[in-house]
Amino acid sequence: MIEARRKDNESIGAFLRRFTKKVQQSGVLMRARRIRFKVDAKNKKEKQLAAMRRVRTKQEREKLFKLGKLDEYGR
């Protein structure tokens, strides 16, 4: 955590520049940008469940296609 207090007789612009420089040097902003959209890796169980869902969905779509309820594009 970065703390900056405004010094006596320090202008807002100078304070803002000093604070911005501290933030850049600490690397807090870069770390936040790097992990912003990070997605955790799926474990084995989640991968298996996702695969089973895909198979089930594919089978359901094929069934509906054979019954004539879906056209070839899935509409």
Image (cartoon, helix red, strand yellow):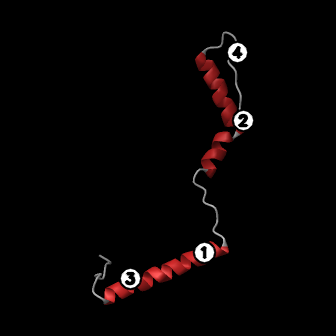
Please give the name of the residue rendered at 72% of the width and 35% of the height, measured from the top-left corner. 1
Marks 2 and 1: CB-CB under 8 Å?
no
Quadrant in the picture for the C terminus? bottom left
**Crowding at mark 2 (Cα within 10 Å: few <14, some 14-19, many 20+):** few
Marks 2 and 3: CB-CB under 8 Å?
no
Relative to 2, residue 66 above or below: below
Tag 1 or tag 2, which sits nearer the N-term? 2
Instruction: Tell me the distance, in whole angstroms, between the alpha carbons under discs 2 and 1.
Output: 37 Å
In the drawing, what numbered circle is on residue 7? 4
In the drawing, what numbered circle is on residue 1? 2
Instruction: Please tell me whether mark 3 sits on a helix, a strand or a loop.
Output: helix
Instruction: Please tell me whether mark 1 sits on a helix, a strand or a loop.
Output: helix
Please give the name of the residue rendered at 59% of the width and 50% of the height, measured from the top-left corner. 36
Q: Nearer the viewer, mark 2 or mark 1?
A: 1
Marks 3 and 1: CB-CB under 8 Å?
no
Instruction: Tell me the distance, in whole angstroms, between the alpha carbons under discs 3 and 4.
Output: 68 Å
Tag 1 or tag 4, which sits nearer the N-term? 4
Q: Which residue is mark 3?
A: 61
The picture quadrant where one finds residue 43 is bottom right
Residue 13 x/y as whole percent = 58, 19
Relative to 52, residue 41 above or below: above
**Crowding at mark 3 (Cα within 10 Å: few <14, some 14-19, many 20+):** some
**Crowding at mark 4 (Cα within 10 Å: few <14, some 14-19, many 20+):** few
